């Protein structure tokens, strides 16, 4: 019954609200978000999906798609369920010429490498859902390992004692934990270790781990039985990857409140933003109304995450620069993911979280004014932010679904 503990309740550590409040907020937000991301403005994402991996050139073969699927292919799996097919992208027949929008975007580089919209192709996100692809093995392991290695900060930043009382330590990362992740050994207890890691570094780790958890939840929620061809939630997958590590679920909720807070802060900016939705003035107005309804719901949730607690001291200025650099590196590492569909969602979601961080830490409220500063965010960043929020929103719904499945299984035993 250890899994009961995995479904958290009470205050979310490092945030200012509890799990129950987030569940309630999400029940309201999820349907709105789900509709919004189906609109043309939000479903077409432009990116350069085939940039060269800037790391580990000495072992280039592992960037090859075939390398990543080797371990999964079995002769008894029908071709359509094979990993390279599942991980392949559906693209428009018009290819790179497909251009659903007039140009209405700008570039501003900050917490992640912002996709250059002059380069790359539009992908219809609705046609390419993030779910089980079979991508696994050394290539996937290497990408995750490199991403966690970005967690090693050079700047020694002591915990400000005055903050100690405000911030609980239950989800901090320890040196033990990091080395365990490096060697890919699953040990339940280590991720709960407490340590005097400063708030900022802990936030960094929780964002990455929460993103990893969320991706794993989608894999388990839309899991393909490669023998029967059935797509359905896989409770055992959820238990082993997520449920048996309670802090991974906590980190999903933590990401959710950070994104929610960013969207709430961005609300006035979005109210004045020109949505070039591609379907004429009516479509633009419809999208704008949907965004306003959603951001109003976000604004009505007070006390989710307090970004002012981060990078507050003079000494933390350098830490902020380092934090940004690490995050940018993670977005570069995403170019090394050896499965097209996984790379698409990896790049999009790191850009979504990066955009949230940019909104929270790079601009104060007055600056976020679309009339005086219309070029703060590109269309790509806005699309990434909302689609990433949607992914976390779906993860929270999926956690509830798995909780129900788990209770049913326990009852049946
Ligand atoms: P992995 O998920 O590869 O994890 C490696 C190690 O990291 C684990 O052994 C554990 O020690 C540690 N770890 C795991 N989760 C966490 C966490 N939340 N917090 C802290 N530490 C953790 N596969 C798909 O089927 N569909 C996809 O869409 C997809 N997208 C991907 C996107 C990216 C960016 C990457 C790198 C991989 C993606 N994959 C996808 C592959 C998938 O994430 C796994 O790597 C794969 O399923 C193998 O899983 P695993 O159980 O070996 O552990």
Image: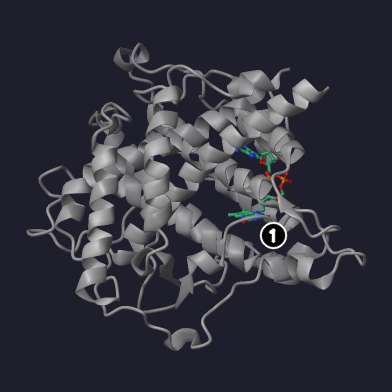
Q: Is residue 375 left or right of residue 386?
A: left
Q: Does residue 296 lie above or below 189 as drawn?
A: below
The quarter in which the C terminus is drawn is top right
Tell me which corner region of the image, top left, top right, bottom left or bottom right, holds residue 261.
Answer: top left
> Which percent across, then down, holds residue 59?
71, 65
Q: Does residue 141 lie above or below 279 as drawn?
A: above
Q: Does residue 42 lie above or below 247 as drawn?
A: below
Q: Is mark 1 within 8 Å of ligand 1?
A: yes
As rendered, which of 333 and 41 lies closer to the eye? 41
As rendered, which of 41 and 139 lies closer to the eye? 41
* Identity of the residue drawn at 33% across and 19% down: 160
Q: In terms of secondary structure, where does tag 1 sit?
A: loop
Q: Is residue 49 left or right of residue 79?
A: left
- Is residue 97 among the parts visible in the rendering? yes
* Identity of the residue drawn at 67% across and 40% down: 182
Report how many numbered discs are placed on residues in the image. Answer: 1
As rendered, which of 124 and 121 lies closer to the eye? 124
As rendered, which of 299 and 404 lies closer to the eye? 404
> Which percent across, then down, holds residue 247?
57, 27
To which residue does mark 1 refer?
Answer: 133
The quarter in which the N terminus is drawn is top right
* Identity of the residue drawn at 56% across and 48% down: 147
Disc 1 packing (10 Å; few <14; some 14–19; many ≥20) = many
* Identity of the residue drawn at 44% across and 71% down: 47
> Which percent across, then down, holds residue 49?
52, 71
Find the residue positioned furthest to the left: 372
- Is residue 154 among the parts visible in the rendering? no
Tell me which corner region of the image, top left, top right, bottom left or bottom right, holds residue 104.
Answer: bottom left
């Amino acid at each position: 019954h250890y899994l009961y503990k995995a479904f958290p309740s009470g205050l979310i550590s490092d945030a200012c609200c509890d799990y129950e409040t987030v569940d309630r907020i999400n029940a309201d937000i999820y349907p709105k978000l789900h509709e919004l991301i189906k609109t043309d403005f939000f479903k077409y994402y432009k990116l350069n999906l085939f940039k060269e991996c800037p790391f580990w050139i000495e072992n280039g073969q592992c960037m090859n798609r075939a390398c990543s699927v080797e371990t999964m292919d079995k002769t008894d799996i029908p071709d359509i369920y094979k990993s390279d097919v599942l991980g392949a992208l559906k693209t428009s027949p018009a290819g790179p010429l497909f251009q659903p929008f007039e140009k209405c975007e700008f570039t501003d580089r900050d917490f992640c490498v912002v996709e250059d919209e002059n380069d790359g192709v539009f992908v219809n996100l609705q046609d390419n859902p993030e779910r089980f692809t079979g991508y696994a093995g050394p290539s996937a392991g290497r990408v995750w390992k490199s991403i966690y290695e970005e967690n090693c900060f050079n700047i020694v930043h002591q915990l400000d004692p005055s903050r100690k009382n405000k911030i609980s330590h239950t989800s901090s990362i320890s040196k033990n934990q990091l080395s365990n992740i490096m060697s890919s050994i699953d040990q339940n207890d280590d991720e709960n270790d407490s340590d005097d890691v400063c708030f900022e570094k802990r936030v960094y780790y929780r964002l990455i781990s929460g993103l990893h958890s969320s991706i794993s939840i989608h894999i388990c929620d839309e899991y393909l039985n490669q023998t029967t061809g059935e797509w359905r939630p896989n409770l055992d997958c959820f238990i082993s990857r997520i449920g048996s590590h309670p802090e991974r679920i906590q980190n999903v909720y933590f990401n959710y409140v950070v994104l929610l807070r960013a969207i709430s802060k961005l609300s006035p900016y979005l109210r004045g933003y020109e949505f070039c939705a591609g379907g004429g003035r009516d479509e633009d107005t419809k999208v704008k109304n949907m965004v306003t309804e959603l951001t109003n719901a976000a604004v009505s949730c007070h006390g989710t995450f307090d970004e002012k607690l981060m990078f507050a001291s003079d000494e933390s200025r350098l830490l902020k620069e380092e934090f940004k650099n690490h995050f940018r590196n993670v977005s570069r590492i995403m170019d090394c993911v050896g499965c097209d569909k996984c790379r698409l969602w990896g790049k999009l979601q790191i850009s979504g979280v990066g955009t949230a961080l940019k909104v929270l830490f790079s601009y104060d409220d007055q600056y976020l004014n679309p009339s005086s500063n219309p070029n703060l965010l590109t269309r790509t960043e806005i699309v990434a932010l909302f689609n990433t929020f949607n992914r976390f929103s779906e993860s929270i719904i999926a956690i509830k679904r798995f909780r129900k499945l788990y209770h049913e299984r326990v009852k049946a035993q």
